[in-house]
């Protein structure tokens, strides 16, 4: 299987790398503006005045649109994992490259669990549109709070580890 991949895709290493980097771009930035400029202000404004129905409606709209918009990030993530795995095999990389070991440890220990929770919150059991149309109002409020807590926990982690992973991949520092 590995030999077959090397024979067929080996000559196209740079195309695979393009796919990897393009997926990294989509994964890393596609929700940033929606979060900082729409979802977060909508939530914080509602929290200052929780009895205002307009603010509540705006908050709910922002969360539901955010769930939809996360499709770009969540399509890019498996593509970057797959293309990263291909680069690893095709380029004869191994974990003696410490930058790569460090990078993959961050991907497995930080990003993988975050993304699993994020898929669930955005598209599966935690999808706000589905809960609004098929669940109860109490459940809806609960899941808005769950999702907000998820953002509060993951935002600092992503702010630190996402640039770090990209730095490691591009600079490939020899000192670690
Ligand atoms: C959040 C996840 C990831 C991010 C942000 C990321 C980011 C990047 C970036 C920006 C590059 C380009 C480096 C350059 O052009 O010099 C790169 C290269 C690379 N990535 Fe990833 N990557 C991720 C996941 C993975 C995974 C899961 C693997 C392997 C299973 C992987 C394996 C590689 C390899 C081997 C290269 C080196 C390609 C080369 O320089 O020829 N990556 N990565």
Image (cartoon, rainbow, N blue to C red):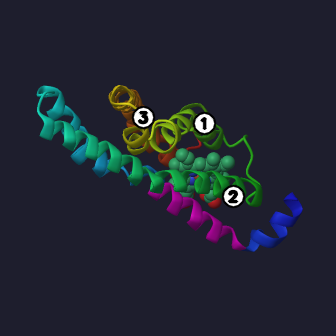
Q: Is residue 174 left or right of residue 36?
A: right
Residue that numbered label 1 is attached to: 102
- Front: mark 2 or 1: 2
- Magenta residue check for 19: yes
Residue 169 shows up from this direction = no
Q: How far, Cα to Cα, is label 2 from label 1? A: 16 Å
Spot occupied by residue 7 in the image (x, y as percentages of width and height): 84, 70
The structure residue drawn at horizontal position 76% and vertical position 55%, both measured from the top left corner, is 89
Q: Quadrant of residue 128?
A: top left
| Sequence-wise first label, 3 or 1 | 1
Q: Nearer the viewer, residue 166 or 110?
A: 110
Residue that numbered label 3 is attached to: 135
Disc 1, SS? helix
Q: Nearer the viewer, residue 161 or 174?
A: 161
Spot occupied by residue 84 in the image (x, y as percentages of width and height): 65, 54
Which numbered marker is on residue 87?
2
Q: Is mark 1 within 8 Å of ligand 1?
A: no
Q: Is mark 2 within 8 Å of ligand 1?
A: yes
Find out whether the residues at labels 2 and 3 contact each other: C-beta distance under 8 Å.
Answer: no
Residue range (magenta): 12-26
């Amino acid at each position: 299987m590995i030999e077959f991949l090397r024979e067929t895709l080996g000559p196209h290493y740079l195309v695979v790398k393009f796919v990897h980097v393009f997926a990294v771009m989509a994964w890393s930035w596609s929700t940033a503006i929606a979060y900082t400029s729409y979802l977060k202000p909508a939530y914080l404004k509602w929290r200052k005045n929780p009895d205002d129905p307009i603010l509540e409606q705006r908050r709910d709209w922002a969360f539901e649109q955010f769930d939809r918009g996360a499709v770009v990030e969540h399509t890019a993530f498996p593509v970057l994992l797959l293309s990263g795995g291909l680069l690893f095999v095709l380029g004869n990389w191994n974990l003696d490259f410490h930058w790569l070991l460090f990078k993959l440890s961050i991907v497995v220990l930080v990003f993988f669990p975050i993304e699993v929770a994020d898929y669930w919150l955005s598209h599966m059991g935690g999808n706000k549109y589905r809960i609004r149309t098929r669940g109860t109002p109490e459940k809806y409020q609960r899941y808005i709070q769950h999702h907000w807590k998820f953002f509060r926990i993951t935002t600092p982690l992503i702010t630190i580890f996402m640039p770090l992973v990209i730095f490691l991949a591009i600079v490939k520092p020899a000192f670690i």
